[in-house]
Amino acid sequence: MLGALEGFGVIGCIILAGFLLGRSGVLGSHGQQVLANTVFFVGTPALMFTTIASTPVSQVFTPALFATAGSALLMAVVMFVFTRARGRSLGEATVAGWSVSYVNIGNLGIPIATYVLGSLNAIPPVLLFQIIVLAPIGFAILDATRTVGAEWWRPVIRVFTNPILIGSVAGLLASITGFELPNVVADPIAMLGATSVPLTLMAFGISLKDGWALPQPGTRTQLTVMTALKLVVHPFVAWLIGGPLLGYSGHELLAIVVTSTLPTAQNVYINALKYRQSEVVTRDVVFITTLLSIPAVVIVTGLLS
């Protein structure tokens, strides 16, 4: 568990750096949005390409993926319906669905997989499922809501010109075909991709520059439901599908449940900023689930080890 705690510590330090930048004002009043746009249009597409292109397809499409994908999709649908039932917009419901299904597999997942699970084999299936399935579905809805009333082809164009989707699809094609870019092209892309995680964390830190207060009464119910779905219901459903339904046990079942117990990814907050949907609630659920996921992962590991 020391490695998992180290992972939380690294993330905390980078968030702190963003917080200090925000407090100092050196990036100006639009610094957070500039970082978010840089991540969305440059860093994350590059990271998605390099990650997917270097991952063999055989490591992705495993039977355990059904448990991971099934539990995540179910959580997203439940939260989407709940949010819509409370009278929120399609965009807000989409971001809420992401918040309970899109886990922090990219940075927290790596140290936890290394030190708790003993290998990184559980990372690629979850990561690519989120990139190839969860992200495009959400972007399709968000982009369509921004072009309501326009010609039918405008939302379609917005979806297929989404930079993150383009990077992901390009990486998947490279993985399937075995195509490799020359180093003079691949190395700059990898360097740009390496900026995605730290800039995301710093943008999140800037959002905390004025401190963090208890959620407003109007959002507490939503935030409570999101946190419970993410850290309690999501792992339980993953266990239910992976164990009793699919027959996994031991280390394989532990990997399925632990990856489902990870907190909401900071990428969801970046997307909320980009599309101007539920920024405050999304920031809060990322913050709270990140803190509470520490004991949650410890408990799950203790129960299933």
Image (cartoon, grey):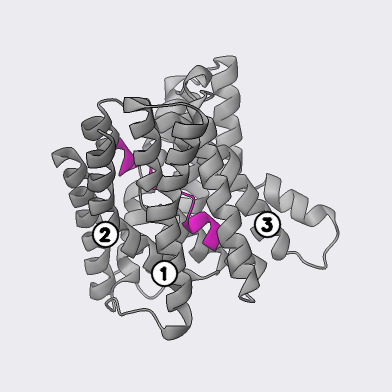
Cα distance in 3D space between marks 2 and 3: 30 Å
Expressed as whole percent of the image width and height from the top left, the position of residue 247 reads: 46, 26
Q: Earlier in the sequence, mark 1 or mark 2?
A: 1
Image spot of residue 53 (x, y percent): 50, 25
Dot 3 surroundings within 10 Å: few (below 14), some, or many (20 or more)? some
- Amino acid carrying mark 3 in the image: Ile
Front-most of residues 27 and 39: 39
Which amino acid does the dot numbered 2 rest on?
A: Leu
Looking at the image, do the residues carrying marks 2 and 3 touch, with CB atoms under 8 Å apart?
no
- Residue 270 percent coordinates (x, y): 46, 59
Tell me the tag on residue 224. Answer: 1
Quadrant (top left/top right/bottom left/bottom right) for the C terminus: top left
Q: Position of residue 287 (x, y in %)?
A: 33, 63
The residue beneath circle 2 is 291
Q: Between 61 and 22, which is closer to the camera in this rendering?
A: 61
Residue located beneath label 3 in the image: 141
* Closer to viewer: mark 2 or mark 3: 2
Q: How many discs mark residues in the rendered view?
A: 3
Indicate which disc, 1 or 3, sits on the residue closer to the N terminus. 3
Looking at the picture, does residue 230 appear above or below residue 185?
below
Q: Secondary structure at mark 3?
A: helix
Mark yes or no: residue 94 visible: no
**SS at circle 2:** helix
